[in-house]
Amino acid sequence: MTEFEIQHKDLMGRIGKLRTAHGYIETPTILPVINPNLVTIEAAEMKKYGAEMLITNAYIIYRKPDLREEALTKGVHSLLGTEIPIMTDSGSYQLYEYRDVEVSNREILEFQQRIGSDVCVPLDIPTPPYVKHKRAKEDLEVTLSRLREARSLMPANGQDNMLAGVVQGSTFTDLRADSARQAAELEFDLYAIGGVVPLLESHGFARLVDLIMASKQNLPLNAPVHLFGAGHPMLFSLAVALGCDLFDSAAYAIFAKDKRYLTSDGTKKLEKLRVLPCSCPVCSTYSVAELKENTDLLAAHNLWVTFEEMRMVKQSIAEGSLWELCERRCRAYPSLVDALKRMTNHSAVIERYDAATKRPFFYLSEYSAHRPEVLRYANLLDRFQLSGRVLITTKEEREEEEYDHIYLVKPPFGPYPVELKESYPVGQSEIPVEIDDVAKTVALQNVLKLLELNSEKAEFVFRYDSSWDGHTLLEEIGKYAEVRRNVSAQESVVS
Ligand code: GUN
Ligand code: ZN
C-alpha cells in the first residue's frame, strides 16, 4: 500500500508525506527534470534549491548504450549522482513529439524496475488537445491496456518501485473521468495527469481546470496526483488547489535556453529587464548583463523562484489561504483569470473537499464572491427557520420598531442574524468598504433564498441604503418583503 499521509488540507490541495524507497518526501513538490544528455544543473545540486525528488527519462537512458549500461549495472541514482528519490518517465512524451519509440511498454517498465526507479511510468499515449472524440477514445483504450499490463507486471504491495497510473483523454471531460475511474480500479501507487503540455503552451488554462477536476473527482483521495509538464510557478497555486500534489519542471531549463526569466506572475524576457527583481542567490550576486551571458545562471534563478513559489503554496495550505494565493496569482494574466473564473464554476465540488472552518477570508476580487465558503454559507441558510416579524437590513441602526429577528446583510454572504456578527465566516471575513456588484448580487440572491424558505411563517421588512440603489434584485425581493429605502440622517439634511 502506498504510504501517503495527508497533514494539512485547503480547498482540494494538501500537504502530504509520501514514502519512497529512497526516503520520505513532502508534497506538494516539483521534480526537476534531469536530462542525462544535456545537464544544466547537476542532479547532486538539486537539493540545495529545495528539490526532494527528481524525474528523468528512462527512454533516453535506454536508447543510449553507454547510459543504459551504466544504469543497469549501477542504478539510475548512481547514474545521476544522487540518492534522492527518482521518478522515471517512459518515453511517452517522445512518442508524442517524434512518433518513433522503439520500445514496448513491457520492456520500458522492466527497464525502469531494473535501474531502481522509485516511481515507474507505463508507456501511455499522450493524445493532443482538441482531436476528435473517436481518436481520443481509441488512444485511451491503448493507454488503459498498457496500464493493465503494467499492473500485472508489477503487482501492488511491497514493491520498491511505485507505479503511476496515467490519465489521458485529450480535452474530453467524459474520457478524463473514465480514464481516471479505470486507472483507479487498477489501484496504482499514484496517478499522473498527462497530455496537457500543448494546452499549457497555448495557455488553455480554463480547459485545464476542467480536465483536472474531471480526473481528480474519479481518483482515490488518498493517493498523490502528478500533473505532467506543469513546471511554471504561476500555475502551482491553481493546480494544487485542484488537488495536484506533484509536478515536474523542465521549464526552468527550457525557459533559460530561451533567455526567459521566470517569476510567479509570469515570464519576462531577459533583454527587457533593467534590474533583477528577485533576491535569490543568483539575482543578489549577478547583474542582468551577466545573466545574459550565462544560461546556467538563468536556469538557476528559474529554479530558485520555482521552489520559492512551491513553499508559498505550502504555507498557504497550512494557514488556509490558498484561495487568496490563487486569486492573486491568477489576476496576473488574462488566461489565468479565465482559469480562476472556471474554478469558481467548480466551487460546489471544491466545497465538499474543503475544511469546514478555517481562517476568515480576504475579499480580493469579484471572484471571491464565488468562493466555496460563500457557497457553503448559502447551502446552510435553511437552518434559519423564521417566524414573526423579521427585519433584514444592509445597515445596522437603533431600531424604533419591534422585530422578532434582525438580520444584517454582508456581501457576498448575504443575510445573517445580528447575534452572529462576530462569528465565522460572515463576521470575520474582511470585505472592502466599496464592495463590487458581483458580491452584492450574491448577497441579494441569498436574501431571496432566505425569504423564499421562510415566506410561509415570517413577515419580512427589507431595508437597504443608497449604495444598493437600482439593484435589479430589489424588485424580486419586493415580492416577499416590504422594501424600504433607508434615508440616512446625513442624506436627509442634504436633500
Ligand atoms: N510528460 C509530459 N506529458 C506527458 C504524458 O502525457 N505522459 C507521460 N508519460 N509523460 C509526459
Ligand atoms: Zn533570482
Image (cartoon, grey):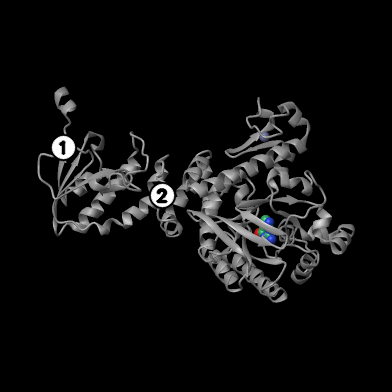
Query: Residue 367 in the image: x percent, y percent?
Result: 42, 44
Q: Circle 2 sits on which residue?
A: 371
Label of residue 398 in the image: 1
Q: What element carries label 2?
A: loop
Closest to the observer, 343 or 103:
343
Q: Is residue 302 left or right of residue 216?
A: right
Structural distance between the alpha carbons of marks 2 and 1: 32 Å
Q: In which quarter of the image is ligand 2?
A: top right
Q: Is residue 376 left or right of residue 110?
A: left
Q: How many labels does the image show?
A: 2
Amino acid at the residue labelled 1: Arg
Query: Residue 234 in the image: x percent, y percent?
Result: 58, 43
Q: What element carries label 1?
A: loop
Which image quadrant is residue 287 in? top right
Query: Residue 398 in the image: x percent, y percent?
Result: 15, 37
Instruction: Please say if 455 is above or below 331.
Output: below
Closest to the observer, 490 or 466:
490
Label of residue 78 in the image: none
Identify the residue at horizontal 33%, vertical 45% (top origin).
412
**In the orientation shown, which residue stands out farthest toward the top?**
494
Closest to the observer, 374 or 199:
374
Report if residue 126 is visible in the image. no
Q: In which quarter of the image is the N terminus?
A: bottom right
Instruction: Please say if 451 is above or below 483.
Output: below
Identify the residue at horizontal 28%, vertical 44% (top origin).
421
Instruction: Please say if 410 is above or below 122.
Output: above
First along the sequence among labels 2 and 1: 2
Which image quadrant is residue 363 in? top left
Q: Is mark 1 within 8 Å of ligand 2?
A: no
Closest to the observer, 418 or 271:
418
Viewer-nearest of discs 2 and 1: 1
